[in-house]
Each structure stands twice: as structure tokens, then as C-alpha cells.
Image (cartoon, rainbow, N blue to C red):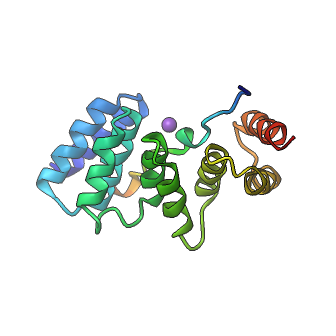
Amino acid sequence: KVQSLYSELNRAGQNGDYQRALNAANKILKESRNDETAFHCKVVCLIQLSQFQHAIKEIANNPALASGLMFEKAYCQYRLNRIQDALNTIQAVGNPSPKLKELKGQVLYRLEQYKECLDVYKDLIKNTSDDYDEERATNLSAVVAALQ
Amino acid sequence: KPLFFDIALNQIELPSLEDKL
Ligand SMILES: [K+]
């Protein structure tokens, strides 16, 4: 049963149908409530559905399942305008992943910590090559402009 | 206000479900 629900979740996710994917993740968690992968999927779906308050509540209520979801937690805080909380969450992670560094750059920009923000973007641009290189360069320009 | 993108949103992705299928 869980395997067929995962097939449905996978298909919905590939189609960008996050409501259907969320329903499947919830059904999996009903069968198997400590399923970390299904919980991760649930949080991602809630964020993609812009249900940031709901997502962060789930994270807060399920610390054992959410221990690997610090990026998602910090992203919710960022979108809920809890910018300093987002920075605290990011800074509590020992060895930040590239996506956490990406979010850190955005958080520092919102906090108007432009010097630190500039260092993050320089590092990101040097060490990243993906579909968002142009957007990243635009963000760097905004930081440089803010410093002047 | 200068243009500033939310790039991190694009990195909110479903985990690999390979070993669940
Ligand atoms: K996405």
C-alpha cells in the first residue's frame, strides 16, 4: 500500500501537483507515521503550496522527523518575515549546504547586512553553476548597489 | 527598489523516492 502511495506521490511531484502529492504523503504518514521521507515530502509540498505557517508548525511538532529539514525550516521563517530566526536556524547548521548558503545570502540582504551578504554571493558565484547563475548575478548587483 | 530574486525557493525539492518505489 505504501509503495503504491509513493508511486502516486512521485507522479504528482513530477507533474508539479503538490496538493495531490501532499494527500499521498499524508496517507503514507497515516500508515507509517515515522516515515522521514514522507514527512520531508509533506513539508516540501506545504511550502510549494505557500502554506508556510502550517509547514513550520509540522516541523516544530515533529522534531525527530524534521532534524534534516533545517533548510526548509529556515525558508519558512524567511517567508514568514521571521528573518532573524531564519539566520539563527542557518547559523546553527555546522556544515551548510549550497542551498543553505543561497538562503543565507537572501536573509542577510533582508537584514541589510550587505558586507556579509556580499561575501556569501561571491562564494556562491565562484562555486555554483546552475540554471540560476543570471539571477544570482542580479542579486549580487543589488548587494553592490546597496553598499554604495 | 533593485531586482532581487528568491533563488532558494527553486531548491525546495522533493527528496529522491527511488528506494521507495
Ligand atoms: K521546485
Residue sitting at the far bottom: A94
**Residue at horizontal 46%, vertical 40%?**
A79
Give the quarter of the image for residue A16. top left
Give the quarter of the image for residue B19. bottom left
Question: Is A29 placed above or below B6 here?
Answer: below
Whether residue A46 is visible, yes or no, is yes
Image coords of residue B10 (percent x, y): 55, 38
**Residue at horizontal 21%, vertical 37%?**
A23
**Residue at horizontal 42%, vertical 34%?**
A14
Question: In the image, A124: left or right of A76?
Answer: right
**Residue at horizontal 30%, vertical 40%?**
A9
Which of these two is toward me, A81 or A69?
A: A81
Image coords of residue B13 (percent x, y): 47, 44
Image coords of residue A11 (percent x, y): 35, 34
Question: Which quarter of the image is occupied by the C terminus of chain A?
Answer: top right
Whether residue A4 is visible, yes or no, is no
